[in-house]
Amino acid sequence: MSSRDLAISVRNLGKVYRITHQAERATTAGEAVARWLRKPLSRSAIQNFRALDDISFDVYKGDVLGIIGRNGAGKSTLLKVLSRITEPSSGRVELYGRVGSLLEVGTGFHQELTGRENIFLNGGILGMSRSEIRREFDNIVEFSGVEKFLDTPVKRYSSGMYVRLAFAVAANLRSEILIVDEVLAVGDAEFQKKCIGKMQDVATTEGRTVLFVSHNLGAVRSLCTRALSLASGRIHMAGGVHEVTTEYLEASLRASTNIIDLGGTRRTGEYGHSLKVQRIAFNRGGPLVHGERLTVRIDYEAYAAVSGCSFGFGISTLDGVRLISFDSDLAAERRDVEKGECATVECEVDNLHLQPGRYSLDVGARSGDSGSVDYLSACAVVEIIPGVRTPGMIIRGDGGVRYPALWRLSADALSENRHRAVGTHGFM
Amino acid sequence: MTIVSDVIKRPTLILEPPSRWQPIDLREIWAFRDLLITLAIRDVKVRYKQTALGVAWVVLQPIVGALIFSFVFGRIAKLPSNGIPYFIFSYAGLTLWTAFSSTLTKSGSALVQGANMVSKVYFPRLILPLSTAFSTLIDFTVSLALLAVMMLVNHVHFTLALLLLPLWLVASQLLALGFGLWTGGMMVRYRDIVYVLPVVVQFLMYASPVAYSASNVPHHYKFIYYLNPLAGLLDAFRWSVFGTGWLGVPTTAYAVIASLVVFIAGAIAFRNMERGLADVI
């Protein structure tokens, strides 16, 4: 069989969702009847939302196609149509081979049932027959690494074990086409690598076709050969994985602005009375890129004199856990601010080591003798995007900071230093 | 959606916008039969995990029901029971009734309960309600075995009519599924069906000869009474068990055929409601 055999052919595919306005929609039969009695002829206001619009593409056997795009671009809808969860509104899809889809890890898993029972249940839901599951049973157990707990109800599993078992079932699905949504966001880094490796095997050695949706460009780059970028339900670009992801990255760089106005934001207590931070700008409004230089400008206005004023900002996770604090204090930079002063302070960071992702921002100014004069907690969300030097294997959710450190791994370096203790650790 | 046979270079599956009426794809349901059984097994296992009495609950419910009925209707109201001890008489009615009502309520809520599965993975949606009937059959077998023991103890004799028992069981299950499928599709859109259903089920129980014998029904009401196919099926079931009270071919045949019609109508309604299901659920 040649590698150019068609696996999926999509022609002019469209999906329209009808959105009834919330207030208009009847959720109980009584409501529906009452509404009909009041206005028997009126039809509730319906808006059409075009989730997919005129999508056409082909996927060949053995291809690993990455599907990327922002939230709401139509990625999940496309997968739902291809995996038959929802029906298309227009167009046509031809599938050459059985489709197995993994839009969620562990669909149908039941907490009270044991691991063994859940393998059969989940496999059945994914479309495997009992004899097929029996045939793959050992592979599944081996891949999941939970053999000791097979007869324990899954409610006693750790979340890691749960995900491993669920992925193992899906990974051993013998379908010619495998559709995988962003399921790798769960589970630890080691297991994620194992999953990506398994999906690569599936495509290269078994010649099966894989469709992979992810926000994670690193994962898409390391796994896929081709990519499709969606924007507002349409195909933005299709082609080789490198060109498409690069284009996508550049487009998102162009789109993001990182100048945050804080003049109008409400403060608690006395904050902002003597001095107010008006604005914070990152990279002159450009994107925050992992591994690149970061410049920060803070504009302030003083309504009273503040002696020994220092400025700072902090970056926290979206749950509010502070990861990094930047203070001019630390660099012994303080300034005696005069009343009525409007000025800008600047901060430069050589290398931004935060993992790509979204973070919460805190900003503040402190007077040397009287504590904080202005402080804004969680005043904005900033996004750090992967850069060209971001390694492909960085996967979302794996820690907050990749701290640079000096590493020695070659034999020469080690023998030179054998009389010295090598005490440099990295937080990997 | 059609499945084309495995000819090389021919698509295995074509997805297109749905046409107005969807036929029921029996071949596809057959292909997913293992899932049907797996779901039924899950149902049974989950129900009795972490319950102290386990399977005993299957028979405790009808036993308690039969005790109450034989006291209220047999002792207090002194209703006749075709010459069979009232307890056994009402227990027999309750075995079939329990199978009917549990399939009706479970198949009705199967879609809402399985909402997570429906929105995450494809399988013929009919599988969900159908699997509830299979788990009911397991319970039914257990309570039927107890009925046989009771009859042996009380020297009630078996007759050849017993051979037709599976027919009444299947018909009553089809009837329950027919109603269940229809309400299930509605329930996705209107959750208040959840509250209406128990009322309807209770009404149906008193409108059918479960706790009492249909011989108590005044003659001029009999025609209307037997319009309810379940009434005919319950009588036919008792006839198979006890060998007395045969209704005659027309009424019995009506009950069986009506059940089949309700099932087919329910399945077609369900098939056409399932279309937008994943979008609404």
Image (tube, coloured by chain):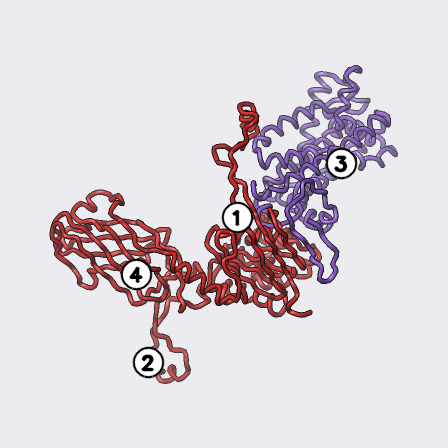
Say few, some or many: other residues with alpha carbon within 10 Å of mark 1 (under 14 / 14 to 19 / 20 or more).
some
Label 2: how many Cα within 10 Å (few below 14, some 14–19, many 20+) = few
The residue closer to the viewer here, A388 or B188, is A388
Q: Which chain is purple?
A: B
Compared across the picture, whether A232 is left or right of A96 comes to left
Q: Which residue is mark 3?
A: B144
Discs 2 and 3 carry the same chain letter: no
Amino acid type of disc 4?
A: Asn
Report if the CB atoms under discs 2 and 3 are less than 8 Å apart. Answer: no
Between the residue at mark 4 and the residue at mark 2, the CA separation in whole angstroms equals 42 Å
Q: Give the residue at mark 1.
A: A51
Residue designated by label 2:
A420
Q: Which residue occupies 69% across, 61% down? A: A135
Which residue type does callout 3 highlight?
Leu
Q: Are marks 3 and 1 in contact (CB under 8 Å)?
A: no
Q: Position of residue A373 (x, y in %)?
A: 19, 49
Foreground pick, B192 / A36: A36
Residue at the spot of label 4:
A283
Give the residue type at disc 2.
Answer: Arg
As measured in the structure, the alpha-carbon distance from the residue carrying label 2 to the one carrying label 3 is: 81 Å
Horizontally, residue B248 falls left or right of residue A246, namely: right
Chain A painted colour: red
State whether residue B126 is above or below residue B243.
Answer: below
Name the quadrant of the N terminus of chain A. Answer: bottom right
Mark 3: few, some, or many residues within 10 Å (few <14, many ≥20)?
some
**In the image, what residue occupies the spot 35% across and 82% down?**
A417
> Judging from the image, what secondary structure is the residue with disc 1 in?
strand
Q: Are marks 2 and 1 on the same chain?
A: yes
Is label 4 on the same chain as label 2? yes
